Image: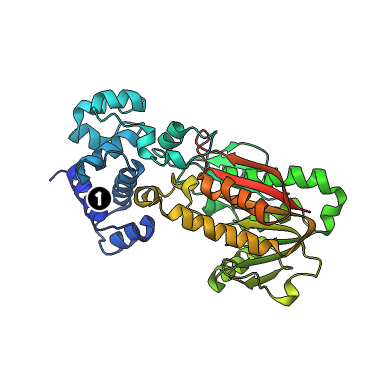
């Protein structure tokens, strides 16, 4: 058996044993951990075949697993590949062409709307076809440089000969697979953070700096779905004198946050565990009677704006889950809102493109609370090799 066929057979074995209930990355890692004969090039090639299979999303599902693996490699590649040259030599010279031109060669008529078919769930303003096409390519790696570390980070990357593009002074774009984490002091001098995740910070800064002015040095801030604390860390870098409180649903999540904050040099903050989906109760010492000045809720969501990084989630996604996310998101936001002071701001963020998880949650919140919408917008990443996100900022009155 040729090496190309061996790679395809191995990828098929992984795919046929995978059911989507766990992330694909650790499944592939575990597979290779028991098969020491595979070198790094073998592992990379086979992993790429698996991911490209899922990058086709809901398109071409009538193909056999083997044929879909080959199609995925062809459509997702923009450089010559030895497997295509051996298995589909008639396609080989067309691999650098556009998707539309590749369709003429394969006869498959692949469409962006077939890759991501949940078009009826998208709001106006999102290009469904472009968003679908974007899943064929893995998004870029983005880094946010922490204040005062610009020279240190740029020098470290340059010395390590790691290519990068400065989008702004703080935001760097790197190719996927870059070994930036090997040469940077992650969390201390730089943070791995997607471009549009960083853009949410710009939206927040512009609105708060305009409306609160010098009072920003004296604000209380609660990140109520903090996860590992990325948004809190960004907020502190923008407004360093903020009194920070963080929470999430599991103690293990908060433990990871403690580790990250320690690496980032953050020592003064409150942290607790709370399930805001079912209750508004938080520790008595977590908030003053007046309530928080700002509450940020980066709520659990479908993650549909990040499926370029985890295409297996697109492949296995059941649209019936959207309503469940909507209800959880509303419950969290509505419960957290009871701890927001009058005049305070509520920041709602998702990495979803679905209207039901975004605009519809905001509409429902404004019907149940005394709120005004200051801004709401989709931060689309399909033209920038980035994730797509949604942010809304509301003020309580």
Horizontal and vertical percent for residue 254?
59, 69
Q: Residue furthest bottom?
A: 284
On the image, the x and y values in percent for residue 56 come to 33, 40
Seen from the viewer's position, the closer of residues 257 and 379 is 379
Left or right: residue 140 versus residue 67 is right
Task: Name which quarter of the figure residue 165 lies in.
Answer: top right
Considering every residue shown, the one lying at the far right of the view is: 214
Q: Nearer the viewer, residue 139 or 121?
A: 121
| Image spot of residue 63 (x, y percent) | 21, 40
Quadrant position of the C terminus in the picture: bottom right
Above-or-below relation of 177 to 220: above
The quadrant where residue 29 appears: bottom left
On the picture, is 35 further left or further right than 186?
left
Above or below, comparing residue 171 to residue 19 in the picture: above
Secondary structure category for the residue under label 1: helix
Q: Residue furthest front?
A: 367
Disc 1 crowd rating (10 Å Cα; few below 14, some 14-19, many 20+) is: many
Q: Nearer the viewer, residue 319 or 303?
A: 319
Q: Which residue is mark 1?
A: 11
Q: Whole-percent x and y of residue 379? A: 58, 40
| Residue at 22% over, 32% down | 85
Q: In the image, what residue occupies the spot 27% across and 23% down?
A: 104
Q: Count all numbered tags in the image, as a single digit.
A: 1
Q: Is residue 376 visible?
A: yes
Q: Is residue 153 visible?
A: no
């Amino acid at each position: 058996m040729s090496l190309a066929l061996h790679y395809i057979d191995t990828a098929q074995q992984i795919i046929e044993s995978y059911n989507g209930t766990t992330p694909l990355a650790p499944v592939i890692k575990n597979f290779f951990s028991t098969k020491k004969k595979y070198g790094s090039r073998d592992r990379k090639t086979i992993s790429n075949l698996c991911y490209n299979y899922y990058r086709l999303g809901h398109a071409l599902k009538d193909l056999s697993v083997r044929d879909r693996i080959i199609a995925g490699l062809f459509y997702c590649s923009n450089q010559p590949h030895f497997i295509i040259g051996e298995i589909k030599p008639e396609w080989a010279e067309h691999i650098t062409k556009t998707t539309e031109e590749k369709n003429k060669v394969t006869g498959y008529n692949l469409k962006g709307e077939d890759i991501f078919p949940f078009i009826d769930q998208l709001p106006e303003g999102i290009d469904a076809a472009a968003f679908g096409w974007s899943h064929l390519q893995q998004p870029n790696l983005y880094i946010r440089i922490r204040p005062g570390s610009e020279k240190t980070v740029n020098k470290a990357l340059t010395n390590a000969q790691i290519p990068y593009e400065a989008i702004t002074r703080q935001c760097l774009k790197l190719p996927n697979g870059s070994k930036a984490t090997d040469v940077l002091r992650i969390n201390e001098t730089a943070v791995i953070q997607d471009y549009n995740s960083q853009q949410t910070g710009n939206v927040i800064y512009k609105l708060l700096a305009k409306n609160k002015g010098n009072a920003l040095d004296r604000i209380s801030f609660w990140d109520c779905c903090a996860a590992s604390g990325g948004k809190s860390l960004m907020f502190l870098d923008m407004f360093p004198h903020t009194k920070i409180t963080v929470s999430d649903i599991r103690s293990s999540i908060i433990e990871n946050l403690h580790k990250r904050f320690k690496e980032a040099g953050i020592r003064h903050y409150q942290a607790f565990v709370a399930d805001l989906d079912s209750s508004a109760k938080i520790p008595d010492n977590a908030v003053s009677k007046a309530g928080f000045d700002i509450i940020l809720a980066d709520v659990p969501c479908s993650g549909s704006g990040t499926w370029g990084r985890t295409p297996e989630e697109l492949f296995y996604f059941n649209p019936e889950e959207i309503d469940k996310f909507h209800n959880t998101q509303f419950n969290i936001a509505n419960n957290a809102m009871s701890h927001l002071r009058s005049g305070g701001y509520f920041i709602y963020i998702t990495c979803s493109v679905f209207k039901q998880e975004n605009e519809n949650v905001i509409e429902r919140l404004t019907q149940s609370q005394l709120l005004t919408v200051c801004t709401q917008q989709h931060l689309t990443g399909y033209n920038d090799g980035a994730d797509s996100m949604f942010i809304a900022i509301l003020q309580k009155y």
